[in-house]
Image (cartoon, rainbow, N blue to C red):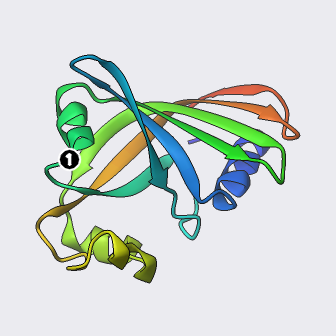
């Protein structure tokens, strides 16, 4: 994937944002919910989220993999929208790698719990607004 200055600015801004909004497509249209963003993971075009395996968002992604993520860094006055392909990942090693102690409040049995899955959103297009500038980045799918 090409690493432009704009992409590096996006990665840096995402690292400062704790919560984003995730939109998936369901039976009755678009569903939106807040999701915790792991700012400790260096952004490479993939966003990772922990989720309950039986959640509505997992079901929706299994049927329609279109996902949109929106981020707002009010302190830095940067706004980011990511359109991508969602995928449900059940990989205990990856869950352990991405695990943070704070997640225990939602997933009390830890990353080895089979009821816990990961959602991977692979960016296809990113738009930015604010101090980092108005940009549209088309990402390669490699």
Give the answer, above or below, for where 79 lies relative to 37.
above
Q: Position of residue 74 (x, y in %)?
A: 78, 48
Mark 1 secondary-structure assignment: loop
In the image: residue 117, left or right of residue 40: left
Q: Answer yes or no: is residue 42 visible.
A: yes
In the image: residue 100, left or right of residue 132: left
Image quadrant assignment for residue 117 = bottom left
Q: Quadrant of the C terminus?
A: top left
Image quadrant assignment for residue 100 = bottom left
Q: Quadrant of the N terminus?
A: top right
Return the residue at label 1.
Answer: 55
Q: Position of residue 68 (x, y in %)?
A: 47, 31
Look at 62% across and 43% down and name the residue there.
71
Look at 53% across and 66% down and name the residue there.
41
In the image: residue 51, left or right of residue 21: left
Q: Position of residue 56 (x, y in %)?
A: 21, 40
Give the answer, above or below, for where 55 lies relative to 60.
below
**Label 1 neighbour load within 10 Å: few <14, some 14-19, many 20+:** few
Extreme residue in the bottom direction: 101
């Amino acid at each position: 994937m090409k690493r432009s200055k704009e992409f590096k600015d996006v990665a840096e801004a995402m690292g400062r944002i704790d919560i984003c909004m995730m939109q998936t497509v369901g039976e009755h249209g678009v569903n939106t919910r807040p999701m915790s963003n792991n700012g400790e993971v260096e952004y490479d075009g993939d966003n990772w989220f922990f989720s309950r395996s039986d959640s509505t968002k997992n079901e929706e992604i299994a049927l329609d993999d279109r996902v949109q993520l929106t981020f707002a860094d009010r302190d830095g006055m940067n706004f980011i929208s990511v359109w991508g392909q969602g995928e449900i990942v059940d990989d205990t090693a990856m869950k352990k790698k991405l695990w943070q102690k704070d997640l225990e409040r939602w997933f009390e049995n830890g990353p080895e719990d089979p009821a816990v899955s990961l959602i991977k959103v692979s960016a296809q297009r990113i738009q930015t607004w604010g101090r980092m500038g108005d940009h549209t980045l088309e990402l390669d799918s490699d």
